[in-house]
Image (cartoon, rainbow, N blue to C red):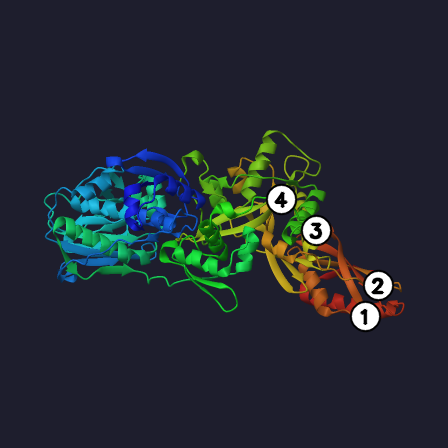
Amino acid sequence: MDISLRWLNQYLTPGDVTAQQVDHIMTEAGMPIEEHKPGLDGDTILDVEVTSNRGDCLGHVGIAREIAAARYADKPRVLTMPVIEQPALGAPIGDELKLENRVPDRCPLFTARLIRNVKIGPSPDWLRKAIESFGQRSINNVVDVTNYITLELGNPCHVFDYNKLAGGTLIVREAQPGEKVKTLYAGEHELRSTDLVVADSERPQSLAGIIGGHDSQVDENTTTVVFEMATWDTVSVRNTGRRLQIRTDAAFRFERGIDPRTIDFAARRAAALICQVSGGQLAEGVLSEGAPLPEDKAIILRPDRCDLLLGVRTEPAEMADLLNALSFKTTVESNGTLRCIIPPHRSHDVTREIDLIEEVARARSLAVIPVQETLPVRTREPQTSERAMQTIARALTGLGFYETITFSFTAPKKGELFKRSGTDLVSVDDDRRKAEPTLRPSVLLGLLATRLANQSARTSAPGGIRLYEHAECFAQKAGTRDTLEHRSLALLSDVPFEGKKPTHEDTQHALRVMRGSIDTVVKSVFGPLARTVITAAKPEHSGFDADAYATISVEHDAGTTPIGGYGLISDAALRAHELDHPLVGAELLLQALIDAYPPRSRAELLPQFPGIDRDLSLIVPESTSWSAIETLARGLKLDKCVGWELVGIFRGKQLGDGRKSVTMRLHFRDDERTLRHDEVDPQMEHLTTQAISDLGAEIRTAV
């Protein structure tokens, strides 16, 4: 940002800082001077490299505050704020002007003042030279004041010709789709509902936070002006400005954030100057609409923490002096900590203790931080989250899965297939991604694209290709801009088959393989005692087959944790990706898996006495799931039963249509003696009786 040396010295006492001194001070403060340029009448223009988080330094007063706070300057200087000369007041503003702010969430504060009997003409020499020293064109005395205030305090503002506002009204609102606004010098633009405008009772009169409107501009015929100063949502200003390709000094500052608490002083200063240079009379009162002003925020700074991070000792009293010089109201508490009240102009970038530590470093000079010739390195074991990811990766790699890293973008049509109900896709306005401007709602989209690349290359693997990836998924709540983001672990595997198309058994085998892979991942992070529960359900999106999907949860010592779902990839998703091979996919909540790590296990003595195993074959309806049989067995709490397992499933004509035979093996054992068969028989009879009653089963064999 360009600053005038002559102008800068107006806010310093003594005001004798030189260009070289400013260069030294600002460089030590972390904002070096990139260029010295000659200005008007012997002035010097300095190009300050202001970082994106320092919107408060986009005005001469902000730079002067930094210089006054520097303890390493050649001499102490004091910040001198501009003096506001209160003009005489006229009739109340409410008699002529009305204000309505319909979007306080996107316009936290909008203020309007009315100035009557202004005389529009050339600016006085001091104002004209100040504006022209930056290469700007002097327009007239009133408009030049608004530009002057922007350069002085960093608060953009605007003036309307009151007589050109329909209904004597200003309305802050969202634009109507297709509505147009004619700007001062950037042409006419068609607006979207996401754009903000300042309108009168009939049409938009300015593009909020970016540029004023042509139809209400101040000219030589203007006699009454409406002066407005506001603050806007940073994202709204940035999105509209980028889409319309309009860059202005106002938008540059609003994009970096302006606290609404800074508006009152800047607006009073601007109104007084307008009255001074135009002879106008300020109406009594201010129209103000928006959200409640934010409260002062206090942050605690620990001196020992500051010393540890900076590597240099600073006394608490000195820290307080340095921070007070930067307008942080700082006191030393009885416990030795510092309590700092964040000033409004720094509320956007000072939010944590570490930010205050940075301020101490800058105020002392970054040069005092020692630079070590070597960096000490302390080795530590990996974080628990990293160990969990390594364990999951080893488990999947051992099962034949290949890890992929894919782009976060996808085509909208593909994204719609994997969009969950109640959400919208997140799109970006970027010419470089015209074909894929949508952030992926599911990591499976990247795996499907990878599978297509393998298909095109005719790549194959024994048992089919298996892929996995862990990455972020993106969405937003339907009808809002609230972002929904989570980390997902996605798995994708082929359905191996011979012939022209897979049989039912081929598909079932692929689902069982995926189930086994999920079981392995679950036990690797939850522990061997965790139990994976599969429940048939309807999928959350159309990327899965509606008739072949199940949710997954894990039962463990602490309760039950849902971790995702798996099933067949739908035909629509296969067609969208031009895939001709059936696939099974899974989506797991990665954070739930990481939180479960490390796995919990329990050590037990090996059994000292032999047990008894019994097999039971049940003929049940095809719809009966293995989990239903497990639930039945668990609920009976069979005496001396220490577990069971699935042996196999048989289907055949002799069983009849819609029937299958499920064989399970039950294990019985007594830790203190050898178990007898006559003790197990009643338990098996009890199980078979309940299976017939509850599941409609027929007993095929019981051995």
Please identify the quadrant where the N terminus is shown: top left
The local secondary structure at tag 4 comes to: loop
Which amino acid type is marked by label 4? Answer: Leu
Q: Answer left or right for 570 relative to 464.
A: left
**Relative image position of residue 67 (x, y in whole percent):** 37, 48
Residues under numbered marks 4 and 2 in contact, where contact means CB atoms less than 8 Å apart: no
Whichever of labels 3 and 2 marks the residue nearer the N terminus, that label is 3
Q: In which quarter of the image is residue 20?
A: top left
Q: In which quarter of the image is the C terminus?
A: bottom right
Across and down, in percent, residue 595 comes to 62, 57
In the foreground, 76 or 91: 76
Residue under pointer 1:
682
Cβ atoms at labels 4 and 3 below 8 Å apart? no
Residue type, label 3: Thr
- Structural distance between the alpha carbons of marks 1 and 2: 28 Å
N-terminal-most mark, 4 or 3: 4
Q: Crowdedness of circle 4 by 10 Å Cα count: few (<14), some, many (20+)?
A: few
Please tell me whether mark 3 sits on a helix, a strand or a loop.
helix
Viewer-nearest of discs 4 and 2: 4
Q: Give the mark count.
A: 4
Mark 2: give few (<14), some (14-19) or many (20+) Cα within 10 Å. Answer: few
Of 698 and 107, which appears nearest the observer?
Answer: 107
> Upstream in the sequence, badge 4 or badge 1?
4
Is residue 649 at all visible to an observer of this figure? yes
Instruction: Tell me, for residue 520, which label it has, or none.
Output: 3
Residue 375: image tag: 4
First in sequence, mark 1 or 2: give its number.
2
Residue type, label 1? Pro
Question: For mark 3, does the 10 Å Cα neighbourhood hold few (<14), some (14 to 19), or many (20 or more) residues?
Answer: some
